[in-house]
């Protein structure tokens, strides 16, 4: 998703299937080469525009703002005694449905356009539209009318009631129900919170601290890495505190003193400044939450999520941690033994974790990821992903060869329901590298599916963006295994978006609870670790009839959960810190981490003089009081996979049930109800715990 953040299945890969894959790729390549790029074929149901000029973007943005203001003014003018569904709720829901694809037409171009002017216009349009929407979210006159209708007792369907409650909740979370003086205070607090959050991030972005090391002090690092470092006058090399320098050192450097120096320097980044900012941020967030009627900021942040309250998050984290504690102890013992053999009796510290996990994995797995990459040509991966998703969910993906696109590499596909032949939606693939384009793999919803005023379904449209190398000039266009997983993950979001059948645009596609949106995609990631599905997506680039080997498949699956107890402990440490500071008053953050670190990390102390809170961006913006959500989605994804698919990943009946019960409802249904519906019981952490404990040390 555009912040963000997968998979599929079917028939065993035989020699015949490999030849079919070859034929498919040849056909797709031929079609791609013959495509007429001056396409003007109309796509049925497509409202979004994909090729607007800079001036057209800004004009459309102004028209959208004017139309939105007109509808909100009209709703606000309804006398409270005359409110009904047709004059209050319907105009707002129709506005959302009609405007979403047009808003996206304005703003998505900043991520993909070749033109600087278009990207700038797109960013400016987004700024104007966001400012207008923020103003709309604070309109007391509109809120009063919606609130009056909500209290009228008019009969509503469950989804309609959920929609109206969400409208009311959003207004009240913005303080519209407060007195004027309190609303002004809410605005002041929000402005200051935004300023401090950005300052925290900016401090990290601008930090140019570097360390100097001699080449022997970097023993174990590849020569190419060392050659790429800046040179100092004294013959040493410069190491920045950016992750592209620090991560390789912490993972590969044989010199314990070097790893420790790097880990300490990283833990001190922007130390006093960002720690002071975070302390102020947390205080202001608590003030804001109390003004809005919440006990503390964590409960405010969690209200629209699945967890609902901080107490539930603490229970969840503590239960997961307790079940994996014994596993983490065993894993740490293995790493300590390795360090004793390599470095003597020196104390094991947090700076040693990455290095000795890698060393242990080298001994456990005969797996060269460089060799693995040779089995994943991008075109073959795509055809395998398509095959898996089509078979699992009863879909057919057809390329639309005469659609208007914004670059020659972009391809458009329709997703058709196999049984009814109904076109369920469309998706664009813009996956090849080019300058000026957004740099990470993600999905963008261009048009949301919903029911229109006339009862027809508005068709969903999605876009996948990535920066893969294209096959050309002897370059086979190969994907790292992590890129395969990322592409599989994002494509699962596309399928979720297209299979959604919610009536309201607000609940369609991926506009669902943040705790829930990643669960389907993380569940489907499991297909990236199963031999049958991996063989469907792979083939040696010089002879694609030879898929990835069984041993490689087994090693990739085992490596996924290797040392997962310790890795989870590190994540839980920061999740607990995040939850504690956002649910308690006047917490001494330095002392809290000194206390939490050895307790959670099995006696490993916090590095002297460091404080991860000063260099952990998720605490500043985007995940405040919600850092736990990554573990949350993994736990419930594991429950679904083990219960429904582990014994047969090619089970189309289970796939169709998943499509109907999990993907189709979108945000129109309570996520816990969705999970209970697909599982036939309440969700549990047991499957997740069993997978971790059975896989990590085997």
Image (cartoon, rainbow, N blue to C red):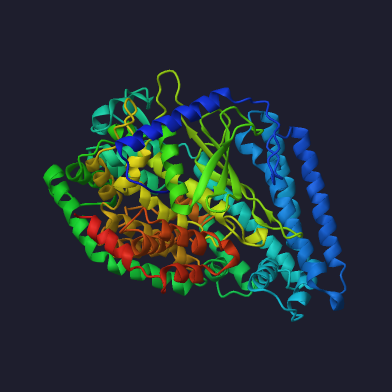
Nearest the camera: 421 or 71?
421
Q: The C terminus lies in which quarter of the figure?
A: bottom left
Q: Residue furthest top?
A: 473
101 versus 375 height, above or below: below
Q: Is residue 509 left or right of residue 137?
A: left
Nearest the camera: 120 or 398?
398
Q: Residue at x 42, y 28 (%)?
A: 477
When asked about the image quadrant of residue 141, the answer is: bottom right
375 versus 581 height, above or below: above
Q: Position of residue 78 (x, y in %)?
A: 86, 70
Q: Residue at x 26, y 58 (%)?
A: 604
Disc tally is 0
Q: Position of residue 646 (x, y in %)?
A: 32, 58
Q: Position of residue 266 (x, y in %)?
A: 39, 45
When asked about the image quadrant of residue 547, the answer is: top left
Q: Is residue 379 visible?
A: yes
Q: Position of residue 187 (x, y in %)?
A: 70, 62
Q: Residue at x 85, y 56 (%)?
A: 70
Q: Is residue 325 left or right of residue 3?
A: left
Q: Is residue 619 left or right of residue 95?
A: left
Q: Is residue 149 left or right of residue 446?
A: right
């Amino acid at each position: 998703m555009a912040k963000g953040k997968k998979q599929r299945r079917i028939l065993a890969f035989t020699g015949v299937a490999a030849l079919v894959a070859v034929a498919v790729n040849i056909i797709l390549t031929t079609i791609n080469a013959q495509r007429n790029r001056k396409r003007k074929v109309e796509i049925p149901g497509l409202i979004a525009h994909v090729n607007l000029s800079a001036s057209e973007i800004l004009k459309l943005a102004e028209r959208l703002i004017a139309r939105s203001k007109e509808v909100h003014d009209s709703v606000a003018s309804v006398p409270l005694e005359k409110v009904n569904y047709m004059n209050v709720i319907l105009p707002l829901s129709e506005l959302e449905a009609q405007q979403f694809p047009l808003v996206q037409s304005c703003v998505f171009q900043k991520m993909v356009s070749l033109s600087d002017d278009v990207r700038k216009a797109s960013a400016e349009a987004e700024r104007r539209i966001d400012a207008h929407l923020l103003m709309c979210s604070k309109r007391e006159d509109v809120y009063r009318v919606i609130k009056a209708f909500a209290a009228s007792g008019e009969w509503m369907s469950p989804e309609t009631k959920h929609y109206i409650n969400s409208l009311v909740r959003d207004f009240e979370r913005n303080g519209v129900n407060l007195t004027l003086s309190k609303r002004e205070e809410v605005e002041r607090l929000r402005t200051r919170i935004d300023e401090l959050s950005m300052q925290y991030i900016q401090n990290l972005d601008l930090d140019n601290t570097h360390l100097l090391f001699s080449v022997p002090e970097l023993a174990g690092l590849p020569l190419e890495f060392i050659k790429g470092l800046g040179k100092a006058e004294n013959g040493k090399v410069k190491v920045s505190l950016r992750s592209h320098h620090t991560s390789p050192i912490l993972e590969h450097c044989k010199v314990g003193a070097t790893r420790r120096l790097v880990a300490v320097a990283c833990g001190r980044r922007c130390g006093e400044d960002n720690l002071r900012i975070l302390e102020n941020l947390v205080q202001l967030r608590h003030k804001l939450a109390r003004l809005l009627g919440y006990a503390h900021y964590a409960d405010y942040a969690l209200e629209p999520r699945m967890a609902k309250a901080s107490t539930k998050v603490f229970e969840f984290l503590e239960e997961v941690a307790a079940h994996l504690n014994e596993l983490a102890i065993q894993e740490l013992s293995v790493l300590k033994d390795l360090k004793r053999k390599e470095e003597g009796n020196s104390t094991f510290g947090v700076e040693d974790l990455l290095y000795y996990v890698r060393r242990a994995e080298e001994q456990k797995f005969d797996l060269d990821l460089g060799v693995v990459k040779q089995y994943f040509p991008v075109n073959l991966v795509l055809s395998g992903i398509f095959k898996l998703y089509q078979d699992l969910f009863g879909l057919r993906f057809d390329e639309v060869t005469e659609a208007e696109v914004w670059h020659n590499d972009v391809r458009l596909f329709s997703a058709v329901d196999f049984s009814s032949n109904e076109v369920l939606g469309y998706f664009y693939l813009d996956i090849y590298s080019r300058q000026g384009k957004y740099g990470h793999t993600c999905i963008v919803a261009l048009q949301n599916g919903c029911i229109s005023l006339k009862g027809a379904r508005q068709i969903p449209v999605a876009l996948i963006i990535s920066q893969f190398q294209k096959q050309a000039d002897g370059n086979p266009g190969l994907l790292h295994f992590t890129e395969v997983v990322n592409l599989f993950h994002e494509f699962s979001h596309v399928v979720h978006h297209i299979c959604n059948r919610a009536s309201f645009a607000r609940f369609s596609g991926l506009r669902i609870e943040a705790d829930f949106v990643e669960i389907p995609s993380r569940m489907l990631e499991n297909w990236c670790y199963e031999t049958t599905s991996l063989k469907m997506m792979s083939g040696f680039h010089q002879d694609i009839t030879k898929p990835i080997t069984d041993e490689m498949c087994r090693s990739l699956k085992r490596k996924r959960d290797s040392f997962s107890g310790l890795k989870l402990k590190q994540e839980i440490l920061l999740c607990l810190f995040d939850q504690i500071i956002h649910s308690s008053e006047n917490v001494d953050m330095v002392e809290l981490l000194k206390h939490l670190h050895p307790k959670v990390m099995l006696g490993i102390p916090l590095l002297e003089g460091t404080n991860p809170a000063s260099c952990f961006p998720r605490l500043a913006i985007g995940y405040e009081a919600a850092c736990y959500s990554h573990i949350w989605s993994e736990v419930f994804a594991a429950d679904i996979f083990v219960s429904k698919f582990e014994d047969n990943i090619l089970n189309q009946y289970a796939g169709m049930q998943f499509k109907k019960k999990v993907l189709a409802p979108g945000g129109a249904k309570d996520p816990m109800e969705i999970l209970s519906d697909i599982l036939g019981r309440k969700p549990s952490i047991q499957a997740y715990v069993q997978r971790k404990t059975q896989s990590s040390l085997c």
